[in-house]
């Protein structure tokens, strides 16, 4: 439970988490958290869906595919083409996916 404030102070700026969510939605970057990978230090994975679909068109990828469709069908190719970015935080994974897709990221 959060400690109540003496004054009701409205938030005027979006939080870092809200900025990250908006950036992911705007650029169609999808992420996944895997707690089982905690020992390796790379719990978060991010994929820029349009770039992945474009690179995998010759293998049967479709524009309507989700993150899990791509991983289920093309995980080896995603890894070999360096389209699947694994990092210790969601923010770093999204930054790497954006960098690979040549999207400017100010997060």
Image: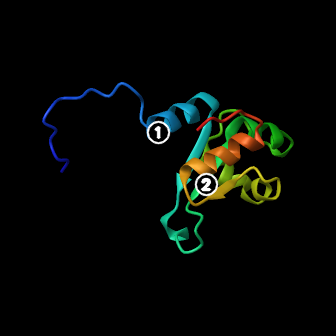
Q: Is residue 8 above or below residue 37?
A: above
On the image, numbered disc 1 is attached to which residue?
A: 16
- Residue that appears at 62% across and 39% down: 29
Q: Position of residue 3 (x, y in %)?
A: 17, 47
User: Which circle's residue, 2 or 1, is located before the other in the chain?
Assistant: 1
**How does the figure colour the protein chain or chains?**
rainbow
The furthest residue to the right: 58
Quarter of the image where one finds residue 44: bottom right
Which numbered disc covers residue 38? none
Q: Is residue 15 left or right of residue 34?
A: left
Where residue 39 sits in the image (x, y, percent)? Answer: 54, 75
Q: How many marks?
A: 2
Name the residue at 69% across, 40% down.
98
Residue 68 seen by the camera:
no
Q: Which mark is residue 45?
A: 2
Mark 2 Cα within 10 Å, few/some/many (few <14, many 20+)? Answer: many
Residue 83 shows in the view: yes
Q: Does the residue at mark 2 contact the one at mark 1 (Cβ under 8 Å)?
A: no
Give the quadrant of residue 9: top left
Q: Nearer the viewer, mark 2 or mark 1?
A: 1
- Calculate the distance from the C-alpha at mark 2 to the C-alpha at mark 1: 18 Å
Image location of residue 12, percent across then percent down: 36, 24
Residue at 48% over, 65% down:
35
Q: Is residue 59 left or right of residue 26?
A: right
Of 94 and 71, the residue lying toward us: 94
- Rendered residue at 60%/72% (across/down): 40
Up the image or down, 102 lies above or below 84; here it is above
Return the residue found at the far bottom. Answer: 39
SS label for mark 2: strand
- Residue 21 falls left or right of residue 95: left
């Amino acid at each position: 439970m959060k400690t109540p404030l003496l004054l009701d102070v409205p938030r005027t700026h979006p939080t870092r988490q809200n900025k990250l969510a908006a950036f992911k939605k705007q650029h169609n970057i999808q992420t996944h958290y895997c707690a089982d990978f905690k020992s390796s230090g790379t719990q978060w994975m991010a994929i820029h869906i349009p770039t992945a679909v474009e690179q995998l068109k010759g293998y049967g990828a479709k524009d309507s595919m989700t993150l899990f469709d791509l991983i289920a069908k093309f995980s080896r190719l995603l890894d070999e083409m360096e389209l699947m970015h694994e990092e210790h935080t969601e923010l770093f994974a999204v930054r790497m996916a954006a960098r690979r897709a040549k999207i400017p990221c100010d997060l």
